[in-house]
Amino acid sequence: MLKTAVYMSGEYYLDHVKKSVTFIFDPVGRSLGTGFFVGIQLEHGGGDAVYFVTAKHVLSPSEIFPPPNYYDSLYIRLNLIGGTAERIELPLSMEPILTHEDENIDLAAIPLYPLQDRYDYLYIPQNYFTDDNILKKKNIREGSNVFFAGLFSELAKNNTNYPVVRFGKIALMTNEKIEINKEGESTRRAHFYVVECQSLGGFSGSPVFFEFQRITPNQTFISPEIYLGGVMKGHYNDVLPVSNGMRKLNAALALVTPCYLLNELLHTKKAKEQREELSRKIL
């Protein structure tokens, strides 16, 4: 049975989160970004279908968005049970890459089942996805706590994955789409959460979580309650005039693609047909 990243009292939940995260490299070994594993229950029982999720732009060598093409092949690095790590080839030209029907949504998901008796990883089950009910019940809004775990490029040279965890707060939630076009591109808009949590290039594709304190009836704090809030897209730049032109500075505000868009992606007709085929194989 595949192991899920289940967060329970008495267990250090960040250890579970970090085991759901992996790093992505191009064919020559340069670090590109972060990905993580999620599980969606098979429609006819038999367990979960596991997907590798990341930001869509991480899979492309192009600076253009939406990506006009993907790498023919990439590598993900997974920690081995007992220490060190190993790279697994991901032949994108042969893999069924799922993307959102709205091409401006920066999400990609690929069915992937690394062997858990060899690789030390977990996946995030669907019951930890944030939906409208969780948003209302937990009153998630500006000021709510968030954190994400991902690749800090300077640490990618190690022989083992060491995800960096960064903490912050929601800075903006809006029902309107936010403009995300780069200079020279046509105007594009998409739904995002803006978080006060500095992101860098390697963090693209990281899982972002909402975090809440849990209190027992006798007022004792136990392990925080967390939900997958979305997927890291990237950071905002602040442009400042300098003597020789303009300089871009990280504004310490990051864009997060909401989890409900990931849920939409993983429940498209194409995704369900893939799971139906998998279910027939399992049964």
Image (cartoon, grey):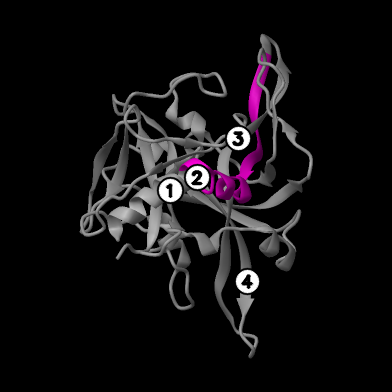
Q: What residue type is labelled 1?
A: Phe
Find disc 2 in the rendering and name its residue: 206
Find disc 4 in the rendering and name its residue: 213
Q: From the viewer's perspective, tell me whether residue 238 is left or right of residue 63.
A: right
> What residue appears at the point 51 percent right and 47 percent down from the top-left corner?
266
Mark 1 and mark 2 residues within 8 Å of each other at the beta carbon: yes
Give the Cα distance between marks 4 and 3.
Answer: 31 Å
The stretch of residues the image draws in magenta is 246-270
Marked residue nearer the N-terminal end (4 or 1): 1
Question: Residue 172: percent from the left, percent from the top?
Answer: 75, 46
Find out whether residue 257 is within the magenta segment: yes
Q: What residue type is labelled 3?
A: Ile
Q: Which residue lies furthest to the top in this view?
A: 244
Q: Which of the two discs, 4 and 3, sits closer to the camera?
A: 3
Question: Residue 83: percent from the left, percent from the top?
Answer: 22, 55
Check disc 3 and report its element: helix, strand or loop.
loop
Check disc 4 and report its element: helix, strand or loop.
strand
Q: Which of the two discs, 2 and 3, sits closer to the camera?
A: 3
Local packing at callout 3 (Cα closer than 10 Å; few below 14, some 14-19, many 20+) is many
Q: Nearer the viewer, residue 237 or 141?
A: 141
Marked residue nearer the N-terminal end (4 or 3): 3
